[in-house]
Amino acid sequence: MTTDLSGALHRLTSRVRAFDTARPRAWDSTLTLFWTFAALVDASGGWRNTAADPTLPAWLVAATTLALAVPLYWRRSNPLAALTVMAAAALVSAASGAFLQAAYLQALPLFHLALGRPAGTLLRAAALLVPPLVVGAVRFPRGSWDQHIVPTLLAYALVALLGITVRSRRDERERAVRLAATAERARIAREMHDIIGHNLSVITGLADGGRYAAAKNPTRAAQALDAIGTTSRTALSDLRRLLGVLREESDPAVRDPQPTLADLEPLIAGVREAGLPVHTELAPAAHALSTGAQLTVYRVVQEALTNTLKHAGEEATATVTLSVTEDAVVTTVTDTGTVPATPGQGQGLTGMRERAALYDGTLECGPPPNGGGWRVRLHIPREDSPS
């Protein structure tokens, strides 16, 4: 029963919020008309139950009531101006002895001041709210002076605290959204770097090989052109899939899956076609890593081989080793280039290290222990590790 009531209340609140967002002026008009009607009902006679002087003329009570209710329409667009007009009407109400209950409507613009204006504005609001209370307590004392002032001020303080609390939570949500957007942009940048950088390097290698083979071996040149076409189509497909996440109405169901360890062999085959001999020692480790961690291994191998193609020289060879220990999966890419195949300090190295850190892994880049060439070593803890 409690769950059903909570769910119904949540749905009602969501609908009201959606209506408010879609039609703010309609909502402001509705709320203003409601409170104006309620205030006029009180002004028709009920106000005398709390008034210090019930003999006041009807026109004064009606005018003061409207001055307390109508400014609510501007409580969001200009809350300080609305509160100023209402405070002036509250001062008339207190000085005349009407003590109209509509004066409590000042809490609404006060809430919006706390919700969307600088904290210093609340001091100006206090300067508007206090004088009517003091004047009423002095002109028409009822018991001790604080009985008329303190409870009302406490109520206003609670309203201001509520506005500050709502504002803080809203700011936290907006900050979380901004951080998520920043992280997504960084992820997309890494993916685009990996896709474009690797495939262009492969295409460059194929084109160079095809150019040398064209004169002596036309068949080999034709094979290189076919491989260039295949690599280009693959790159375009990957880019379309990646850019699809930026479309507001993209359908996740039609996106291709991200690469896993099963895609390492086709990746390495493409590098071999580009002219880089690659030796592999790949242990079956798919069961030891999540899909995201497998993508990390794939991208690190892709980036390392791309750097070898770019920087290691024509006579270089590479070795890709993937091994499974009791508590980790270790991936090593080593080349024999005379020029270090370092990824530098740009997007490549940063992206590899960020990917490794996402899964509590480590990345080491540098010359291998026996000297010569370059080595990239990725260590990712196994999720099914006893530790």
Image: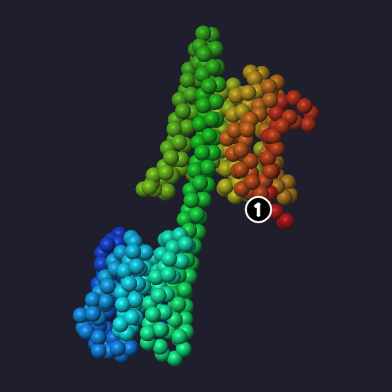
Judging depth in this view, the residue of 331 and 93 nearest the camera is 93
The residue that appears at 54% across and 12% down in the rendered structure is 212
Quadrant of res 22: bottom left
The residue that appears at 43% across and 40% down in the rendered structure is 243
Judging depth in this view, the residue of 265 and 340 nearest the camera is 340
Query: Is 104 placed left or right of 175 in the picture?
Result: left
Residue flagged by tag 1: what amino acid is it?
A: Glu
Residue 2 drawn at (x, y percent):
44, 79
Would you call the spot at circle 1 few (<14 residues within 10 Å), some (14-19), or many (20 or more)? some
Query: Is 168 placed left or right of 310 in the picture?
Result: left
Is residue 298 something that shows in the picture?
Answer: no
Judging depth in this view, the residue of 290 and 118 nearest the camera is 118
Residue at far front of view:
139
Residue 93 drawn at (x, y percent):
31, 80
Query: Is 251 placed left or right of 66 in the picture?
Result: right
Residue 11 drawn at (x, y percent):
37, 69
Judging depth in this view, the residue of 13 and 265 nearest the camera is 13
The residue that appears at 40% across and 84% down in the rendered structure is 138
Residue 204 drawn at (x, y percent):
53, 21
Is residue 240 something that shows in the picture?
Answer: yes
The tally of labels here is: 1
Q: Indicate the quadrant containing the C terminus: top left, top right, bottom left or bottom right.
A: bottom right
The residue that appears at 41% across and 68% down in the rendered structure is 125
Residue where numbered disc 1 is placed: 383
Q: Indicate the quadrant containing the N terminus: top left, top right, bottom left or bottom right.
A: bottom left
Q: Secondary structure at mark 1?
A: loop
Residue at far top of view:
215
